[in-house]
Amino acid sequence: MTVPTPFWRSVEALNNFVYLVPEAGKHYASVGLKGSWMGYFASRSAPLGAASPELVIATFHGFAPHLVHRALPDAWALATPEAVNNARLELATTVLGRAVSGEQMAPLADALTEIIGGLDLAGKPLAAAHASLALPADDLGRYWLANAVLREFRGDCHIAVLITHGLNGIDANVLNVAAGNRFPQQQALRGWSDEEWAAGQDRLRERGWLDAEGAITEAGTATRNELEVATDRTCLGGMSQAAVTTAGEIAEDVRAAARALRTALKP
């Protein structure tokens, strides 16, 4: 038995919105943070404590180091990790509450909490840090935090797979964009210079994954697909059988929650 791919996609959608909603910058400014990037790096890494830039670069993987250094460690002089964690949870439950109610999400919160209890967190630092946070008392908060643990769990597994395949943060982004899995603006969003991006393209050409024009080759597509399969396999290896079973049982309900959220967030 495997965890359905749509389950993982929905988990990601139900986690990432908290970093993307327009009010995020203003919300984090209320606890002292400055700018959207500081809000992003501080809020996602706060479960690790007052994380150093180097730790965040290592655990986030795909971002240019200079982008992280602009936000950290300055953020921790402005707000404590505890304050940032609380601010993120408040923002998450407020926005999630536009799409679903706590009563609706209570059964899923219970199920996700059971799933994260059946995870092997060895080698999965961001998931482990999130799992160390106390579960909120309210159902929306419980749901979102348990969901965040799962999102970071798969992210940690994916980074392990990328590293095993010799893909650094630049090259992984270049391959994703060439495969059509990310917006063309991904280079700028992740902070990589034109020179760094071009060097990444050259490395992928040497491996036969891009052609002379920078388009993905059949070998590159096969590799990109294998990265996803290997990530799912790595996740499966860190989940109890009961966790896998429960994930399969609630997959459609999680997808429905993700669809409701997308609808609620449409302009």
Image: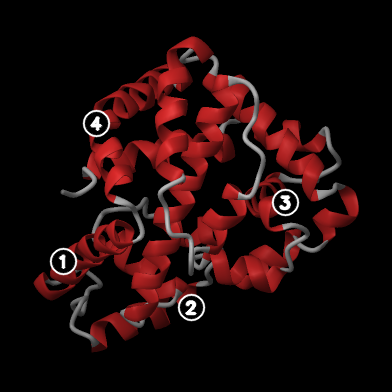
The amino acid type of the residue labelled 1 equals Thr
Q: CA distance from mark 2 to mark 3?
A: 23 Å
**C-alpha separation, residue under disc 4 versus residue under disc 3:** 37 Å
Mark closer to the observer (4, 2): 4
Q: CA distance from mark 1 to mark 2?
A: 22 Å
Q: Earlier in the sequence, mark 1 or mark 2?
A: 2
Q: Is 51 displayed left or right of 128 in the figure?
A: right
State the separation of the CA atoms marked 3 and 1: 34 Å
Relative vertical location of residue 212 with respect to residue 32 in this rendering, above or below: below
* CA distance separating discs 1 and 4: 31 Å
Q: Earlier in the sequence, mark 3 or mark 1?
A: 3
Per the image, label 3 sits on a secondary structure element best described as: helix
Near mark 2 (Cα within 10 A), the count class, few <14, some 14-19 or many ≥20, is some
Q: Is residue 190 above or below residue 23?
A: below
Residue on which disc 4 sits: 249
Q: Which residue is mark 1?
A: 221
Mark toward the start of the polypeptide (2 vs 3): 3
Residue 203 at x, y percent in the picture: 33, 85
Q: Is residue 185 visible?
A: no
Circle 3 is placed at which residue position?
Answer: 38
Amino acid type for the residue under numbered disc 3: Met
| Whether residue 46 can be seen here | yes
